[in-house]
Image (tube, helix red, strand yellow):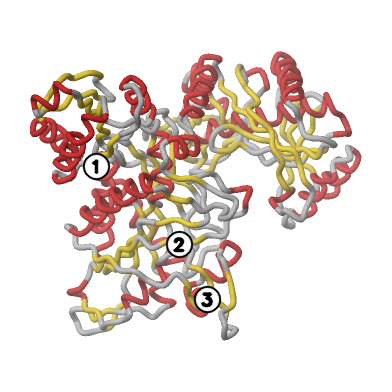
């Protein structure tokens, strides 16, 4: 017998060699029916995995991120099997992983998939699900695996096998006649995939390399229940209506043009929103002791080599040569410039924590296929800060940072969850320092969230340190990566940073990288979709539109506009010779919070006829009363 400790801390004894699924059945039949994968000592495993020693075990269902991924990964195999049944040797298999929202599979086929093709593939998938094929896992030696894939004429699989490190376990999954090279994990059979939808297809390059073969990628989504799929598809339709790229043009906020791929042109209204957010950000940080600076856009390669970015990030940087033949790069991040600011003076322990913030424009050389509106751009403003602390100050500083995050997100009514991202494969520095940094972050999260009430994303830390990622959900339930808090022991050492401690000795500070909105561009894109363009009054680029009924009311409209502007209200006048009903509809389409209708009655009463985007027709109100109403509404967000 072996001892198994469950997530809730309870313990049980099971027969040595029992599978994770068998343990789930011992806990409850319902849990076993819903199980997708297991986690043994923090490592995600297939339900078929046997338990041969004492361990910690967590059963993953579709409610868990890892459970979803196993379910979606299995669905990608079902889709690949359907494609092979329909297209045979005319479709070559490559890879088909789960992703954040569903799955995809890349195929080498003679021509792109059409909508009709996707419908046929879906029908064949339904047959495979109905067959309820059991997935069986087995391993082969390298030579056996290559031989199997060569016999099946799957050249891409052969390439993948040949590149596996020596000694690596090579596993396959079979479902009926379909054989797939795969590490797993997978659910037990195809019959559990009750509902799915193939969403679209697009081109992709093998291994993401544009010099290699062009493939056809099919994206899909699946769920254990049909009702969950219906809800998801409704959300997708709602998301289309809220697409920030579409609304950005319609509301005159921003646009993209082929003259600057991945770089937004900000219209006056959009840039007004940008500045409102920046003012909010500055206000919240200034009162907490943050000092804002600005640094160069272009830095010598010497700086990037010292920081380590040259070795770890060069391919994502815009590199050029100046007039003197020196190698330069547009900055993809602000940390080295912050370090140069730190180095201008001899620092004392009394100066720490020292918080340098900046919102400089940064550039990242993203591939064109990765660009996605404001969500993935090549030029953006990041709400950065780099905080220099003593080791004893790390926990308190991170708590303070998360308090700022809580305050800022609450303004928008956004809930967030925290994820700890640990050491990646290409980490830089001493292992002991990484262990120390990860332990500190875990302690903070245990205290703030409670033990096990946050996620751990193994291997997704930055190359210079572990990080806490802040993820929030919008009104459609979509999850977004927002801010990040990264503990860095490495860069201070690489740049020989120091401070004089209380004992008169030189010590090395710890650097905390942090961004809360992430980037203002991306945040505005998210907010545009979250609010469907109907921004709260305080954030709306135009808060009030004046609608004079006739030319004779324009003079009064100008007087009202002047009073509103004096009170800090953002206002515009619609002076077009159109009917008032048309002007109202136009203002509603532009999602203006307040429309003020101005006619003879309003002029005589020195008042305004108020129509609210949210409440409809409010009626006639004195100008001062309306100004107080708007100012109160704006102040409430604080």
Q: Compare marks 3 and 2 and give the one earlier in the sequence.
A: 3
Label drawn at residue 570: 1
Residue furthest to the front in view is 552
Label 3 sits on residue: 305
- How crowded pointer 3 is (Cα within 10 Å; few <14, some 14-19, many 20+) is rated as few
Label 2 sits on residue: 362
- Compare residues 40 and 467 and report the one nearer the observer: 467
Residue at the image position 29 percent from the left and 37 percent from the top: 412
Q: Position of residue 295 (x, y in %)?
A: 37, 71
Closer to the eye: label 1 or 2: 1
Q: Is residue 526 left or right of residue 152?
A: left
Q: Position of residue 55 (x, y in %)?
A: 49, 41
The reply to whether dot 3 and dot 1 touch (C-beta < 8 Å) is no
- How crowded pointer 1 is (Cα within 10 Å; few <14, some 14-19, many 20+) is rated as some
Q: Compare marks 1 and 2 and give the one earlier in the sequence.
A: 2
Q: Element at badge 2?
A: strand
Q: Element at badge 1?
A: loop
Closer to the eye: label 3 or 2: 2
Residue at the image position 16 percent from the left and 19 percent from the top: 619
Label drawn at residue 124: none
Q: From mark 1 to mark 2, how far is it between C-alphas?
A: 30 Å
Quick check: 229 above or below 162?
above
The C terminus, quarter of image: top left
Q: From mark 3 to mark 1, how far is it between C-alphas?
A: 47 Å
Residue at the image position 32 percent from the left and 36 percent from the top: 415
Q: Compare marks 3 and 1 and give the one earlier in the sequence.
A: 3
The total number of labels drawn is 3
Q: Position of residue 395 (x, y in %)?
A: 27, 57
Q: Is residue 480 left or right of residue 283?
A: right
Residue at the image position 33 percent from the left and 64 percent from the top: 386
């Amino acid at each position: 017998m072996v001892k198994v400790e469950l997530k809730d801390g309870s313990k049980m004894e099971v027969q040595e060699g029992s599978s994770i699924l068998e343990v789930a059945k011992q806990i409850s039949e319902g849990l076993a029916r819903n199980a997708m994968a297991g986690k043994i000592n923090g490592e995600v495993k297939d339900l078929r995995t046997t338990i041969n020693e004492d361990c910690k075990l967590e059963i993953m269902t579709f409610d868990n991120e890892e459970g979803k991924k196993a379910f979606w990964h299995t669905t990608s195999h079902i889709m690949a099997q359907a494609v092979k049944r329909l297209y045979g040797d005319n479709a070559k298999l490559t890879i088909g992983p789960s992703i954040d929202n569903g799955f995809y599979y890349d195929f080498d086929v003679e021509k792109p998939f059409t909508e009709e093709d996707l419908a046929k593939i879906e029908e064949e998938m339904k047959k495979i699900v109905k067959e309820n094929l059991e997935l069986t896992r087995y391993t082969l030696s390298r030579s056996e695996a290559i031989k199997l894939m060569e016999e099946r004429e799957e050249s891409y699989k052969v390439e993948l096998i040949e590149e596996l490190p020596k000694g690596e376990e090579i596993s396959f999954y079979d479902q009926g006649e379909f054989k797939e090279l795969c590490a797993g994990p997978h659910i037990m059979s195809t019959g559990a995939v009750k509902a799915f939808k193939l969403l679209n297809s697009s081109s992709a390059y093998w291994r993401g390399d544009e010099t290699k073969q062009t493939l056809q990628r099919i994206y899909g989504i699946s769920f254990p229940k049909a009702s969950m799929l219906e809800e998801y598809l409704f959300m997708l339709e709602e998301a289309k209506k809220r697409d920030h790229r579409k609304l950005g043009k319609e509301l005159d906020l921003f646009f993209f043009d082929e003259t600057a791929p991945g770089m937004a042109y900000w219209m006056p209204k959009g840039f007004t929103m940008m500045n409102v957010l920046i003012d909010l950000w500055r206000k919240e940080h200034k009162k907490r002791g943050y000092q804002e600076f600005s640094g160069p856009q272009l830095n010598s390669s010497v700086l990037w080599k010292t920081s380590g970015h040259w070795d770890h990030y060069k391919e994502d940087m815009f590199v050029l040569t100046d007039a003197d033949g020196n190698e330069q790069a547009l900055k993809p991040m602000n940390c080295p410039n912050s370090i140069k600011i730190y180095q201008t003076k001899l620092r004392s322990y009394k100066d720490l924590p020292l918080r340098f913030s900046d919102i400089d424009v940064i550039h990242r050389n993203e591939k064109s296929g990765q660009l996605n509106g404001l969500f993935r751009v090549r030029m953006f403003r990041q709400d950065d800060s780099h905080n220099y602390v003593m080791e004893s100050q790390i926990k308190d500083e991170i708590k303070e940072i998360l308090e700022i995050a809580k305050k800022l997100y609450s303004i928008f009514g956004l809930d967030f969850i925290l994820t700890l991202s640990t050491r990646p494969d290409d980490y830089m520095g001493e292992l002991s320092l990484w262990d120390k940094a990860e332990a500190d972050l875990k302690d903070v999260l245990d205290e703030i969230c409670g033990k096990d009430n946050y996620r751990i994303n193994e291997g997704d830390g930055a190359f210079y340190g572990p990080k806490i990622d802040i993820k929030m959900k919008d009104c459609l339930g979509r999850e977004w990566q927002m801010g990040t808090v990264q503990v860095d022991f490495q860069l201070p050492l690489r740049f020989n940073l120091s401070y004089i401690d209380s004992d008169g000795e030189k010590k090395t500070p710890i650097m905390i990288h942090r961004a809360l909105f992430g980037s203002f561009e991306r945040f505005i894109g998210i907010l545009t979709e979250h609010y469907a363009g109907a921004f709260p009054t305080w954030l709306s680029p135009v808060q009030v539109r004046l609608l004079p009924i006739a030319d004779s009311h324009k003079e009064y409209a100008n007087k009202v506009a002047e009073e509103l502007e004096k009170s800090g209200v953002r206002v515009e006048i619609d002076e077009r010779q159109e009917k008032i009903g048309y002007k109202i509809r136009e203002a509603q389409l532009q999602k203006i919070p307040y429309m003020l209708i101005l006619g003879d009655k309003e002029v005589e009463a020195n008042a305004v006829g108020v129509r609210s985007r949210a409440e409809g027709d409010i009626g006639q109100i004195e100008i001062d009363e309306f100004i107080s109403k708007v100012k109160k509404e704006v102040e409430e967000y604080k």
